[in-house]
Image: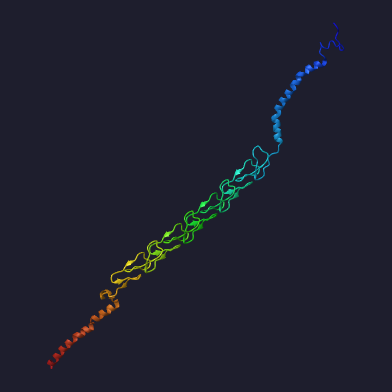
Amino acid sequence: MPKCGRKTSSCRGNRPTRRAHVSMQTAPMRNTIPLFVTLLVAALAPGYALAQDAAAPACQARPGQHCPSGTTEAATCPAGQLCVGGTAAPIACPAGSYCPERSSSPRPCPAGRSCAAGAAEATDCPAGSFCPAGVAAPIACPAGSYCPARSARPRSCPPGSSCSAGAEEATECPVGTFCPGGTGEPIACPAGSFCRARANQPQRCPAGSSCAARVAEATACPDGSFCPGGVGAPLACPAGFECTNGARAPRRARGATVAAAAPATPPGQARAAQAQAQPTPAAAQGQGRPAQAGQGQARRPAAQ
């Protein structure tokens, strides 16, 4: 049997060469390295992601901006909200204030306007209400006042007009009523007075006329009655008197009897007449003396 040596080619097919032997030993390692690298990368992947996040720049929000979650860029604060620098989420604008876009602080609501919570801009106060500065909702105009649009405060109702609650303008006082300043509803004109349109107080009914309640003009007193000033209805003329042509007072009728027409005697004249009718004590004594004298004269001749 021939010997196999290094130079013998006949033995190369039976015995493996050195290179073939080494290749057979490293084949399992070549299959293992890719698997090891894959496992290592999978294990280090979370840490790698964290390192990338740590290396990313932080969100820098200025006043009027905010940093939405999951982003690194600041966003503009929306209208109706406010954003203090560095806030993650916008804050709703409080009532009585308004917040336009990019607001970092609320702006007070001006007079004549209202601002509800979350308002982007102030709203004009409607007619019939008023809005002081910093109010969230309009306030109804009270009775006796009127409020045009954008009123900061109610205005007093002028004399001769009335203003009900929620009025946007004054209303002219109708006839038969009167309206002092600051009146909510017209007041009925009382009897004995008359009230024209836009009257701020009743006028006294003149003499010779009568004025029922809620009238605009005085009525002339009819014949057969008289009307002193300030009466609500005519007064009946008394017997023995006449009342015509809007009489202010009754007049004595013509052709009336003396007894009915004779005036009363004044007290001084009555005492004087009584004094004349009664004799004085001296007169009474004088009337008695002539009789005595006659008797004396009759006696004297007898004495002689």
Q: Which of 274 and 253 is in front in this view?
A: 253
- Residue at the location (70% across, 30% down)? 47
- Residue at the location (15% across, 90% down)? 297
- Is 97 situated left or right of 303 in this image? right
- Residue at the location (76% across, 21% down)? 30
Quarter occupied by the C terminus: bottom left
Figure quadrant of residue 301: bottom left
Residue 292 in picture, x, y percent from top left: 17, 87
Residue 231 in picture, x, y percent from top left: 36, 65
Quarter occupied by the N terminus: top right
Residue 96 in picture, x, y percent from top left: 57, 49
- The colour style of the image is rainbow
- Is 173 situated left or right of 117 in this image? left
Whether 260 is drawn above or below 60: the answer is below
Residue most extreme to the right: 7
- Residue at the location (29% across, 79% down)? 269
Residue most extreme to the bottom: 304
Whether 103 is drawn above or below 209: the answer is above
Whether 188 is drawn above or below 238: the answer is above
Figure quadrant of residue 33: top right
- Is 1 situated left or right of 157 in this image? right
Residue most extreme to the left: 302
Query: Tag count in the figure?
Result: 0
